[in-house]
Amino acid sequence: MIASTCIDCGARFRREYDQTWKVRCYACWKDRREVRPAPEPAAPIPPEMLRRLLQLCHPDRHANSVAANTATRWLLDQRQGSTQ
């Protein structure tokens, strides 16, 4: 273990040698997480763009690849979700 100094409050805390990403004490880290705003919901894909994306990634155009099927399925789910 190694002693480090919190970049927010200056308190000393201990971390493992390989945990160089730890720059805050637990109290500051926890406070920072609680203040973080919730992510805003993504805007729906406009119908004309959704149609274009479906045409571009359709499995018939990509030798029925797994990636094309997955992308098409996801886009179709987006379309169904926007009509509900």
Image (cartoon, helix red, strand yellow):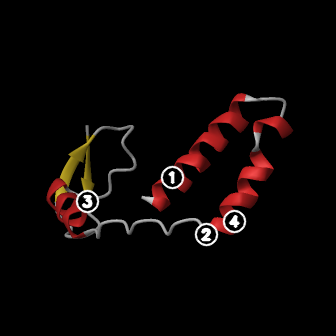
Q: In which quarter of the image is residue 34?
A: bottom left
Marks 4,2: beta carbons within 8 A = yes
The amino acid pointed to by label 1 is Gln
Is 29 left or right of 73, judged from the image as shown? left
**Residue in the image at 52% along x and 66% along y:** 44
Earlier in the chain: of badge 4 and badge 1, it is 4
Q: Which of marks 4 and 1 is in front?
A: 1
In this view, 67 is above or below 39: above
Q: Nearer the viewer, mark 1 or mark 3?
A: 1
- In this figure, which residue is indicated by the disc labeled 1? 80
**Residue in the image at 19% along x and 70% along y:** 9
For the residues labelled 3 and 2, the Cα–Cα distance comes to 48 Å
In this view, 35 is above or below 53: below
For the residues labelled 1 and 3, the Cα–Cα distance comes to 51 Å
Q: Is mark 1 on a helix, strand or loop?
A: helix
Marks 4,1: beta carbons within 8 A = no
**Residue in the image at 29% along x and 70% along y:** 37
- In this figure, which residue is indicated by the disc labeled 4? 49
For the residues labelled 4 and 2, the Cα–Cα distance comes to 5 Å
Earlier in the chain: of badge 1 and badge 3, it is 3
- In this figure, which residue is indicated by the disc labeled 2? 46
Earlier in the chain: of badge 4 and badge 3, it is 3
- In this figure, which residue is indicated by the disc labeled 3? 5
User: Residue 8 appears at what percent x and percent y?
Assistant: 25, 70
